[in-house]
Image (cartoon, grey):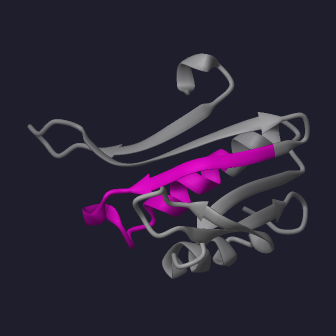
Amino acid sequence: MLRSGAMTGFTHVTRRTGAPLRLNGYILFRTMADEGEILSVAVCGQARRRGVAGILMAHALQDMLDAKVQRVFLEVGEANRAAINFYKGINFEIVGRRHNYYGSASRHKCNALVLRWTAGAQKI
């Protein structure tokens, strides 16, 4: 996705003395005219609850604001309460639902919530 030029991504890495870089998390997003979309956010288990997602999201939102984005959208699984609470905490609001959005023929399908963040309505 990054090679297409239509996506942007950031990573959060750390390094301890003498150790290799450690990938703690990443975010992928894209902008189209005055809208942005968060495509993927992931934080490894050992780095969760340490502010990594907030750092990544702040950088992504600032990058999109610099590109004159007015609204940012994302989807999140309806059962993913931790992610939903995180997004609400940074002023995303639920604006829709996509039924049976996640899953496959062999797995239980679940709904996705569509969330929106609006520039100017709050600070990053």
- The answer to whether residue 42 is left or right of residue 92 is left
Examine the rendered structure and indicate whether residue 91 appears above or below residue 45.
Answer: below
Q: Is residue 21 magenta?
A: no
Left or right placement of residue 14 versus residue 96 in this view:
left
Check the picture and name the quadrant holding the N terminus: top right
From the viewer's perspective, is 83 left or right of 38?
left
In which image quadrant can residue 100 be found?
Answer: bottom right
Rendering coords of residue 45 (x, y %): 29, 64
Q: What's the residue at 11%, 39% (across, down)?
A: 19
Image coords of residue 120 (percent x, y) = 90, 61
| Front residue of 75 and 7 | 75
- Identify the image quadrant of residue 34: top right
Q: Nearer the viewer, residue 24 or 5?
A: 5
Left or right of 13 in this view: 74: right
**Is 46 part of what is drawn in magenta?**
yes
| Above/below status of 111 relative to 105 | below
Above or below, comparing residue 24 to residue 2 in the picture: below
Instruction: Tell me residue 2's x, y (percent).
Output: 55, 25
> Where 47 falls versus 29 (above or below)?
below
**Farthest residue in the left direction?**
18
Q: Which residues are magenta?
A: 36-60
Which quadrant of the figure contains the C terminus?
bottom right
At a point 68% along the width and 77% down the height, the residue shown is 88
x 8%, y 37%: residue? 18
Front-lying residue, 117 or 115: 115
